[in-house]
Structures are given as structure tokens and as C-alpha cells.
Image (spheres, rainbow, N blue to C red):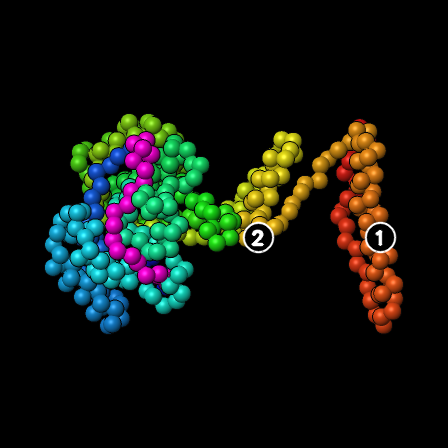
Amino acid sequence: MLEEIISVSKPRASKMVTADPEVLKTLPGIDSKISFCSFVNYLQDNRSAVTDTKERFYNYLIEKFGEQTSLLNNEENLVSSADNDALLEMLSTSLFPAVADHDKISFALAAPYQFRVFYYSDSFRKLFFDDKKEYLLLPAGMPPEELKTIECAMIYEHVLEKFYGIKLNDSPELVYPVIDANTGMKRYYRIRYDRRFIDIDLKAELPPIQDCAVCLNTFRIMDLEKQLAKMPLDLFEVKGFAVWVAEDVTTSESLDAIKKILLKQDECDAGVINDLKRTVQALVGLSDIEVGLMPFVKINELGYDAIERVMNVNFYGTIYITKTFLPHLLTRPEAHVVNVSSMGGFLPLSPWD
């Protein structure tokens, strides 16, 4: 948001980068054009409510965009021109005041409701472009149907709010799992999608809302395919640009994944343990963390070797360590031995059979 104080890393030269065309074929299309009219209108509407210094900056941007009438008239070929890099850099500065660590923010300017970005920070490029910097990556492992649901939900949220006065309760989020190049650890980034500079217009008559797949009690789209049939996306034209801001949500995503793993009713096999280990490693940011789960086994099914191993680790291991350090501790004026156990010592969890 413009009102937020967010640091911004130095943007690179503008260049249109899209997602893999084969993936884009699976997504519904919408008439989308890049324009800066909404942004200029925003500056004009808000310049009287800001400080004198910012007002002068807004006026300067309005003047510069006024000189570049092609940008206001949707000529996308000029967006990727080096002649406009300075102007786009000033635009990004108005969005993200550079007052803090410039390496912390990852952002991109994108075509409305499409996976096409034309201006971006270096950190965004490193996180979300392929190794050759030719394609915009999509979340690894996300099925095309889920990607389609998220894209359509964002469009219909805008449509329903503008033309029907309905605000949907569902807000699907685009979350990227990314491997950190420095640590090798997985991190998660949520894309915050700012659509304030996108205008959406009608190209044909809208259907009655009662005929669509929107539940007017829960304000949710109950059947996406029906919604697309009753209110196809070719009814609309969108102009402007979106602002993508990547937020690190590794902690919340990792905790949610751990919860799902622990609540599984399946057997505790090696695959589950490995999933849990990788998720815990992502949470703490360390690759040398080992984790395990205590299985619920029946006493009658335990072999004597397993019983001996448990006793050696849990009982004799504690005794041996204590006896090793005790002579040295007894020579000190004051010392303590603290042994930590689980609640299993008070309430055994293994049934007899």
C-alpha cells in the first residue's frame, strides 16, 4: 500500500517476463492491457492530502506521464523500452519510499490479472525467475486447477465488488515455496496483490447475480465452472497494472504444515518423518536439525532387542552421563544435575495388547 513505509531494492531495467506459455494455456484468459491512467488519477486525487514535498513529487510524475501519452494509451511495447526505465523507477519510489534496508522488499509491476511482469526489484527477480531469467516461475507443485481457482477468484472478487456491491469471503492466496540459494533451505513467500491501479470495464451485459454460482448467504463462489459459464471472463476488459509484493511467510506456512503432518491418521513411516524434518528445518532455518516421532506400540508386540535399546537410551544413558559428571560436580561449592523427561514417565502411552 502507498501509505505503508516499505523499503525498496534498486529496480532493474524494465523487461516483459511471462510464465511458461504451456502453463498459461491452461488458465482462462481475460482482455488485459497495461496502462498508467489509474495511477495518474490516483496521484491527482491524493496530491492535496500529502506533504508539500510529496505533492511536488506527485506533480512531477503527473507531468512526466503526461508527456508519455503512449503509456496512457495502452501501448505495451513502450513499457519494455529503456527510455521509460527512469520514469518507472520514480513510480516504484512513490509506491515504496526508500527509507530502510533496500534489500528487504521484493516487488514487481504486472499486467492486470495475468502472470506477466514488466518491472521488478532485483530480489524479486532472484526469487521468482528461472535460472536463465526467461520465465516467471509459478508455485512449484501447485496443480493447474488450483492456479486457475486463485486467478479467477481475484478477478471475480473485483467484478462482484464493483458491479454488484458484493465482497467475497474467500481470498485464495498465491504462496511460493522457494529454495534459498545461500542456505539451501525452503522458504515460503505469499504474494500480496494490490489492484488499486486496475480498472475493470464491461464489454457486454452482466447476468443477474441469482443465475450465477455465488452463494448470497456465505458470499462464496460455490461452483467455479458454473460461474465461468454464467459470467465468462470475456465480458470484461481490465486496464492498469498490479503491484505484487512478496512477503516471507515461512513461519506460518511451516507451522501449518507441521500441524497437518502431526494430525495425519496414517502410519508413522519414513516418508512422514522426512516430511516433518524438512518442515522443521525450514521453520528454524537450519539444515542439521533432526526430528523424530514416538510411535504408539503395544508391549506384547515389542521384541526384547527393542526393549533393551529403549532402556539403554532412556534409563542407562541417563545414569551413565550422570555418573560421568558427578565426581567433578561434587568438587564444586555448588552444582546441580538436571534430567529432563517427557510426560511418558508419569503416564505410559503404550497399551499391553
- Which picture quadrant has residue 32? top left
Q: Earlier in the sequence, mark 2 or mark 1?
A: 2
Residue under label 1: 320
Q: Residues within 10 Å of mark 2 (few under 14, many from 20)?
A: some
Q: Would residue 15 be counted in the magenta stretch?
A: yes
Q: Quadrant of residue 213?
A: top left
Secondary structure predominantly adopted by residues drawn in magenta? loop
* Left or right: 273, with 183 as reference point: right
Using the image as rendered, state which of residue 37 and residue 85 is in the foreground. Answer: 85
Position of residue 24 measured from the top left corner of the image (x, y, whole percent): 31, 35
| Residue 69 in picture, x, y percent from top left | 11, 54
Q: Quadrant of the N terminus?
A: bottom left
Residues in magenta?
Answer: 6-27
Q: Quadrant of the C terminus?
A: top right
Helix or strand or loop: what does disc 1 sit on? Answer: helix
Residue drawn at x 85%, y 72% as measured from the top left: 333
Residue 226 seen in the figure: yes
- Counting other residues with Cα less than 10 Å from the Cα at mark 1, is it few (<14), some (14-19), or many (20 or more)? few
On residue 149, the disc is none
Q: Horizontal placement of 340 versus 42: left or right?
A: right
Query: Real-space Cα distance between discs 2 and 1?
Result: 30 Å
Q: Which residue is mark 2?
A: 286
Q: Residue at x 59, y 42 (%)?
A: 276
User: Which residue lies most toward the front here?
Assistant: 132
Residue 42 in sight in this render: no
Q: Residue at x 78, y 31 (%)?
A: 298
The vertical placement of 304 against 173, above or below, is: above
- Placement of 327 over or under 207, stated as above or below: below
- The kind of residue on which mark 1 rests is Tyr
